[in-house]
Image: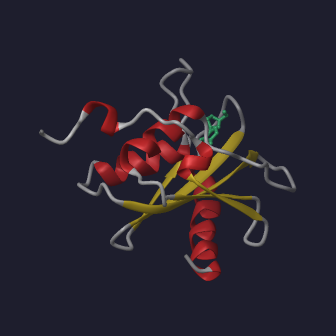
Amino acid sequence: MTNEEMKSLIAKALDMRNFSYAPYSQYKVGAALLAADGTVYTGCNIENAAYTPSNCAERTAFFKAVSEGVKEFKAIAICGGKEGADVLDDCSPCGVCRQVMSEFCDDEFIIICAKSLDDFTVCTLPECLPDRFGPSNLIRPKM
Ligand code: THU
């Protein structure tokens, strides 16, 4: 992925913070998920008064894509931080979101955690979730 492609994905994730529904944590997260065909699926965190039904921005983006039949992905950009803060947080995906990524993404999948268009870190899925339990543990090729 080029730097420009990463910045374009980050810009979409930053925009998505505007749709975040986070009245309980005031921690607004946006995500932009790049599918293998070039389509971008966006997401934000959606909280709930009962807390546990809350959904992270990353999973919102993944579930939007998968529910439209898309299951191959290249990268995701994530931007998060407290509402109104001058600088965004180093927002890294939670364990549940990493496991969801692991269901659909290969070892080349890139996770971009961005504080701004120019301040971001990049890691691969195996770096974020080593020794992952995944589909290959359950679905084996026929002998
Ligand atoms: N959250 C995300 O949406 N993505 C992350 O990577 C970390 C946390 C959300 C969940 C909750 O709505 C709020 O941020 C505070 O945890």
For the point 40% across and 60% down, which residue is it?
A: 73
Which x, y percent locates residue 64? Answer: 36, 50
| Image quadrant in which you'd find residue 3 | bottom right
Residue drawn at 63 percent across, 48 percent down: 29
Residue appearing at x 56%, y 21% in the figure = 51
Which residue is outermost to the top? 50
Q: Is residue 68 left or right of residue 129?
A: left
Position above or below: 122 against 54: below
Whereabouts is ligand 1, in terms of quadrant? top right
Q: Quadrant of the C terminus?
A: top left
Q: Is residue 4 above or below residue 46?
A: below
86 relative to 129, above or below: below
107 with respect to 129 (left or right):
left
Q: How many numbered circles are shown?
A: 0
Q: Residue furthest front?
A: 143
| Residue furthest to the right | 86
